[in-house]
Image: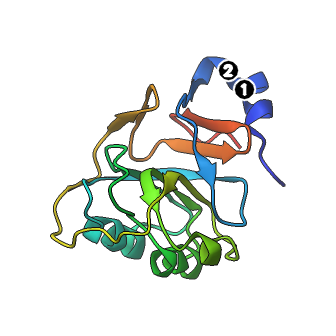
Amino acid sequence: MRIKTTDLCDDYSNELSICKQPFTFYGRKKAFAGPISTVRVLEDNVLVKESLETIPEGHILVVDGHASRNCALMGDRLAGIIKDRNLAGVIIYGCIRDTANIAQMDVGVLALGTNPIKSNKKGEGEKDITLDFGEVSWTPGNFAYADEDGIVLSERKLI
């Protein structure tokens, strides 16, 4: 059963936060939902990779990349981890690369845009913290629901 954000808004509007930041889908999966895990980094994807390798199956990794367009925080190798580990998807407030390859993968990937330059590898950033972008708070353990109509957040699992 596919969860639609429009239906969630109709049925649970008083419980939802609506992300106002537009994102673009890059993987073949155009709808995904799950509990949120978080990372905040600036032009460094070491913690992104580490999180993709360790967060629980079915989770969505939300990456606050400070909306930087200077480099990509994920490419096709990291997208492969999403598929291999059966993660719900990733939402990146920043850029990705290898989009032609990711477009062929059955993964949920949302990002602001693309950049062919790889990120730094210093391991700097923070994990498992509340993030604020898109006029919403992304709190670890809360739930995100994403599809072509947008992203909605809830403090509890709705469906």
Q: Against 133, is 35 above or below?
A: below
Residue 14 vs residue 61, the one in the foreground: 61
Helix, strand or loop status at disc 1: helix
Give how far across and how far down residue 54 sits, in percent. 37, 73
**What colour scheme has been applied to the protein in the rendered image?**
rainbow
Judged left or right of residue 8, residue 19 is: left
Q: Disc 2 marks which amino acid?
A: Ser
Residue that extends furthest to the top in the rendered view of this protein:
14
> Which quadrant does the N terminus fall into?
bottom right
Helix, strand or loop status at disc 2: helix
> Crowding at label 2, few (<14), some or many (≥20) Cα neighbours within 10 Å?
some
Residue 21 vs residue 17, the one in the foreground: 21
Give how far across and how far down residue 102 sits, in percent. 61, 73
The residue that appears at 24% across and 53% down in the rendered structure is 42
For disc 1, the marked residue is 9
Give how far across and how far down residue 109 sits, in percent. 58, 60
The residue that appears at 21% across and 73% down in the rendered structure is 121
For disc 2, the marked residue is 13
Residue that extends furthest to the right in the rendered view of this protein:
1
